[in-house]
Image: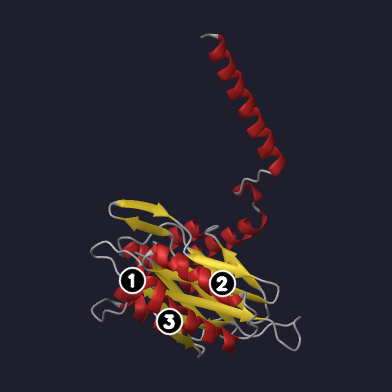
Amino acid sequence: MTAIAGFKCVDGVVIAGDTEETYGNDKVYAHKLFPADRKNSRLCVAGAGLAYLIDYANAQIVSALDSGITNVKDFESALADTMEGLYETKFKHYPLDPGQSLQIQLLVGAQFANEGDQSKWGKPALFECQSNLVTQIKRTKQSCILGAGEVLKQSIVQLASWGLTAALAEWASIYLIHEAKRRLGGAGGKTHVFVMKNDGKFSYNLGKNIDEKESILGLFSRSSELLMLSLDPSVTDAKANDFLRAGVQWLRDARRELKRLERSDQTGKHRSITIHDREIEKMIKALNAVMQSTAQKSEEGK
């Protein structure tokens, strides 16, 4: 199962997804967001359904992007033709096990440099693909959640109705994918988020610090429960105020911790391990030398 979410924001497009794939009783972890960055265009495809078909569709969509398309209108037409062609010819010949389906769901974000001035970028577009049916999500305050995340459809619609910025939509996406992983079997692993901004800036978060943020979100319901209990008319005003103060204090503490995580994300190089190519080459050479020496001694001992 998969949970992927997309927001059309006032200043960009946000796409997020989990990373767990299930094969029977086995789990593997894989990227489900597929960005492609070009000089004058960029793309992000996220999919739910049979992994091989999603990979194949992604390759065809990237090929369409690289065919000389320079604007959203032409890309939408090419995307629709690509998906229609896949279901007319390629996919119908693909062998399926009993119980499997050819249906795949995709969220596709695309952005192009202005044709008149390529130093500037046009607004990114967001598309929903239900098998061979392609729909552009045009209006700000619109959103989409696919795969196992369908049970959270009401939540994403309500969040999007606030008219979120891309920054707020990124945070809302982390919350929604966290909820999908918490509630649904088959959704799990890290949360990945891709953001395209109207000004041409973009980012791809592969889960850095998201685990820590989700651990805080895991306790969020406890705070909301206190706020809910404070509404009960049978509770005294004094006790209701106690509930409210406790809930607000938790939110303040959680916000303080999240701000600390943001600061450490910017300065904490200790969180990652970097190995340069030359070091890898030295390590491999050393290992090969040991293996050759061992093999030579083994031959001499025969």
Q: Up-down: is 295 above or below 101?
A: above
Residue matched to label 1: 102
Tell me whether the residue at label 1 lies in contact with that at label 2, contact meaning CB atoms closer than 8 angstroms.
no
Secondary structure of the residue carrying tag 1 is: loop
Q: Position of residue 287 (x, y in %)?
A: 61, 28
Answer with the quarter of the image where residue 2 lies: bottom left
Q: CA distance from mark 1 to mark 2?
A: 20 Å
Mark identifier at residue 62? 2
Answer with the quarter of the image where residue 22 lies: bottom left
Secondary structure of the residue carrying tag 3 is: helix
Quick one: quadrant of the N terminus? bottom left
Sequence-first tag of 3 and 2: 2
**8 vs 43, nearest the viewer:** 43
Q: Is residue 126 left or right of residue 270?
A: left
Which residue is found at the position 60% from the left and 69% from the top?
36
Secondary structure of the residue carrying tag 2 is: helix
Q: Give the amino acid at mark 1.
A: Leu
The mark lying in front, picked from 3 and 2, is: 3
Can see residue 227? no
Residue matched to label 3: 84
**124 vs 72, nearest the viewer:** 72
**226 vs 112, nearest the viewer:** 112
Sequence-first tag of 1 and 3: 3
Q: Position of residue 14 (x, y in %)?
A: 53, 75
Which residue is found at the position 48% from the left and 83% from the top?
81
